[in-house]
Image (tube, grey):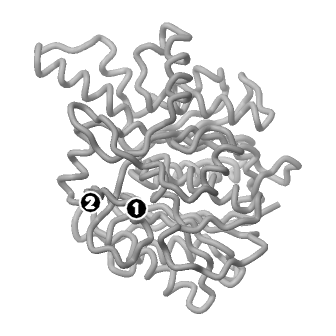
Amino acid sequence: MSQKIAITSLSSISPLGNSPELIWQNYLNGETLIAEHPVGNSKALAAVLPDYLKEEIARLKDSESKYKNLDDSVLYAILASRKAIENSGWKQGDDFGINIGSSRGSTQLFEKHFQEFLETGKTHTLASPTTTLGNISSWIAHDLNSRGPEISHSITCSTALHAVLNGVAWLRSGMAEKFLVGGSEAPLTAFTIAQMNALKIYSKSQDQFPCRAFDMAKNQNSMVLGEGASVACLEIGVKQNALAYIEGIGYATEVLEHSISISAEAQCFQKSMAMALGTTDSKDVDAIVMHAPGTIKGDSSELKAIELLFGNNLPMLTTNKWKIGHTFGASGMLSIEMALLMMQHQKFIEVPFAENQKEKKPINKVLINAVGFGGNAVSILLSRP
């Protein structure tokens, strides 16, 4: 890209925790954070926030009367956004844009209000304003008292990386100098998991690793859901506090055979990765954080796309979904977080049950992939400062 875009801060709340030190330690231990948890009136495999973060969310909810009626997806994003701008040196009231998306949005609240409607024929006064798609970015703008544009969108599992694309476009256009981007998801509801079960992609495994993301020998789908939010501060130009620079962006849409299809060679990923690489030599990419949702076709088609594009210059390949599940609209930014930590610590985090890979050092360039239902692929190429 002609203009450098710096990531000056990234903050998240997820099953990994909410501090870089704890998140990194959790990545190093090689254990999954997926377990069976109560969901609705039954139990399901899921990756949930640790108790101390649930308590922090509860305190946030009680801190202001307006927040009592908000969905967890909004509260997660508010908490992560506060920390992100604090770490970047931005201040509340500054002129910065906001684009925080979600795949499912206010799932818990929507189901609650709809159930009330089914039972009584009426619904709560705030049912509509607290479940609209623009809910997340609007409340963050309110909480941070920001003065820039605020955008919301849903592009399924590539939502957070599409927010990065939007932020880059605004910055490069000269219409903004700072942009807060990311995704948030609170999908651990009985209805959401029932939808994944209906697609026959949800894990039934009781093994040590219920989600077998990047296991190319698996004979059954093994996707598991997780919850969380992750946001990043983007600024244009060279910055002393840059965690990484966005060196390339790529996007493509699959030609669909049906609503959740992806081709055997993931042509959307081939196109998005090639676009993100631009003039960068493929051998200069040290690692790829794959989308790899834990489904047979999703994992294998992405790997095939990588092999076709990179040939003999195959980077180290990894994913975090075996550990924290699939956080839908937040997943792409959590993958960026993993990439930043690997570059910072100069250590590759591999999938514990996958075939060992020859570790490359140093880790200077990492490619991040995401794709969602509808074949909306995004690839982001990061470089270490």
Three-letter amino acid code at the position of disc 2: Ile
For label 1, the crowd category at 10 Å Cα-Cα, with few meaning under 14, some 14 to 19 and many 20 or more, is many
Residue 357 numbered tag: none
Rendered residue at 48%/54% (across/down): 32
- Rendered view: 29 above or below 263: above
Image quarter in which the C terminus is found: bottom right
At horizontal 67% and vertical 39% (from top left) the residue drawn is 19
* Residue that label 1 marks: 293
The residue identified by callout 2 is 201
Where does residue 206 sit, x and y in percent of width and height?
31, 56
Helix, strand or loop at label 1? It is loop
Vertical position of residue 385 compared to residue 263: above or below:
above
In the image, residue 343 above or below residue 317: above
Could you tell me if residue 175 is visible in this image?
Answer: no
Towards the viewer: 108 or 221? 221
Q: Residue at x 47, y 70 (%)?
A: 353
Q: Are marks 1 and 2 in contact (CB under 8 Å)?
A: yes
Residue at the farthest right position? 240
The kind of residue tagged 1 is Pro
Which quadrant holds residue 38?
Answer: top left
Residue 201 rendering spot, x and y as whole percentages: 26, 60
x and y percent of residue 158 in the render? 46, 55
User: Image height check: is 321 above or below 252?
Assistant: above
Dot placed on the residue nearer the N-terminal end, 1 or 2: 2
Q: Would you say 118 lies left or right of 28 here?
A: left
Asked which quadrant contains residue 349, the reply is: bottom right
Q: Quadrant of residue 121?
A: top left
Secondary structure state at the residue bearing disc 2: loop
Q: Residues within 10 Å of mark 2 (few under 14, many from 20)?
A: some
